[in-house]
Image (cartoon, rainbow, N blue to C red):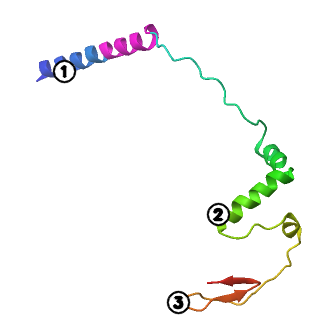
Amino acid sequence: MAMADQQFRLGVGVGGAVLVAVITVLRFCGSVSLPPKSPPPTGPTGTQTQLLSKSTGSPEVYRKFLENDASLAGLPVPSIEEMSRKLPYRVDDARHVLNPGDSPIEIAGLRLH
């Protein structure tokens, strides 16, 4: 068995050397052609905070946000004056459990179904 074990080790060593040679040739001697780099995207630039402050600083943009949100919610579009009102602070510390089929309850100015 000593002869077969020695042949196996020699075969593994030769195979490993061939594998290292093939990988080295492919990695360092081959050339890879890449497509040309695409141009950078165009559009607004700046940090997220800067872009948000620019967009919400404009009344027209803010009105458009309100219109989009109202249409998604299926509600009438509120005016900017209505949106600028201060909301009263309300709290309800009682525990309420909602079950399907129960009648809606009103909590802190909100109607929950």
Q: CA distance from mark 2 to mark 3?
A: 26 Å
User: How far across and down, in percent of the image, does residue 37 sit?
Assistant: 59, 20
Most foreground residue, 18 or 34: 34
Please give the label number shown on residue 98: none
Q: CA distance from mark 1 to mark 2?
A: 71 Å
Q: Are marks 2 and 3 in contact (CB under 8 Å)?
A: no
Q: Quadrant of the N terminus?
A: top left
User: Circle 2 is placed at which residue position?
Assistant: 72
Q: Is residue 95 above or below residue 64?
A: below
Q: Start and end of the magenta stretch?
A: 17-30
User: Circle 3 is placed at which residue position?
Assistant: 101
Q: Nearer the viewer, mark 2 or mark 3?
A: 2
Type of the residue with mark 1: Phe
- Left/right placement of residue 32 relative to residue 72 reads left
User: How far across and down, in percent of the image, does residue 43 sit?
Assistant: 72, 35
The local secondary structure at tag 2 comes to helix
Crowding at label 3, few (<14), some or many (≥20) Cα neighbours within 10 Å? few
The local secondary structure at tag 3 comes to loop
Q: Nearer the viewer, mark 3 or mark 1?
A: 3
Q: Quadrant of residue 63?
A: bottom right
Q: Quadrant of the C terminus?
A: bottom right
Type of the residue with mark 2: Leu
- Left/right placement of residue 27 relative to residue 16 reads right
Type of the residue with mark 3: Gly
First in sequence: mark 3 or mark 1? Answer: 1
User: How far across and down, in percent of the image, does residue 101 sit?
Assistant: 53, 90
Q: Is residue 89 above or below residue 17?
A: below
Q: Which residue ends up furthest to the left in the rendered image?
A: 1
Residue shown at 76% from the left, 66% from the top: 77
Q: Quadrant of residue 93?
A: bottom right
Magenta stretch, overall SS: helix
